[in-house]
Image: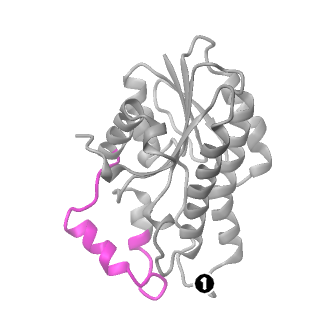
Amino acid sequence: MKAYIITGASKGIGLELAKQLIEAGHCVVGIARTESELDGMKFIQADLSKTEKLESLLNEVIESVPENVGSFTLINNAGMVDPIGLIGSVSPEEMTKAIAVNLTAPMIISNAYISKLKDFQGTKRIVNISSGAGRNAYEGWGTYCATKAGLDHFSRVVALEQLKAKHPIEIVSIAPGIIDTGMQENIRASSEDAFPLLDKFIDYKEQGLLSSAEQTARKLISFMENEDYKEVGPIADIRNFNMD
């Protein structure tokens, strides 16, 4: 049995990942701010923007996993696209929260995960759910782009450090493509002044170009199960892999 720890497990990709991994017989611990009653998932309600509580939370999560698991995978999935707006017009409080959720939280959780499992000899992986926004600049997404770029570079550093570890953790920061989730609804609800690419994202929806959360979760699970992270490297895009 494999153990999966998923942040943002109550909706979108996180919820679909949890569903499909439970159906496959794995141990799944979900963490999210909003409640989830998904059968078979051990759920812990937590606000990831409260970063001072995350180290003890992660330790609690790992201790709750059965001792006979053969592998651990941490999926840092939780994220927020807000605040949407040109720099100079956005709320500093919203920027601070987004940085905490999108970047500070996965860094702290990964740090605690690596420390707690340093002597575990089974397979250990971290999957950071990134975005093309971390690799390309988009007007109106200054905070989101910056946090995802930071998550990518953090993953590069961890991959480099783990080359020298006795029982190394494999890490990849993967962009999942454009998905029909609540985040896309938030984007389409913004104004063109705040997000100049608004019409383009409305077209994605109207033309049926968005992947479903279910499809994306299936591709991510196939990636996690079939790809050699050391060969892939720390930065990846799910669209570059044939998972169908």
Q: Nearer the viewer, residue 184 or 238?
A: 238
Residue nearest the viewer, comparing 24 with 122: 122
The location of residue 59, given as percent across then percent down, is: 74, 30
Q: Assess whether residue 62 is covered by the magenta stretch.
A: no
Q: As drawn, is 232 to the left or to the right of 147?
A: left
The answer to whether 149 is drawn above or below residue 69 in the figure is below
Residue for point 67% across, 29% down: 61
Farthest top residue in view: 68
Quarter holding the C terminus?
top left
Say which quarter of the image contains residue 104: bottom right
Q: Is residue 131 above or below residue 59?
A: below
Across and down, in percent, residue 161 comes to 67, 42
Amino acid carrying mark 1 in the image:
Ile
Q: Is residue 22 above or below residue 198?
A: above
What stretch of residues is rendered in magenta?
A: 187-213
Tell me the element at label 1.
Answer: loop
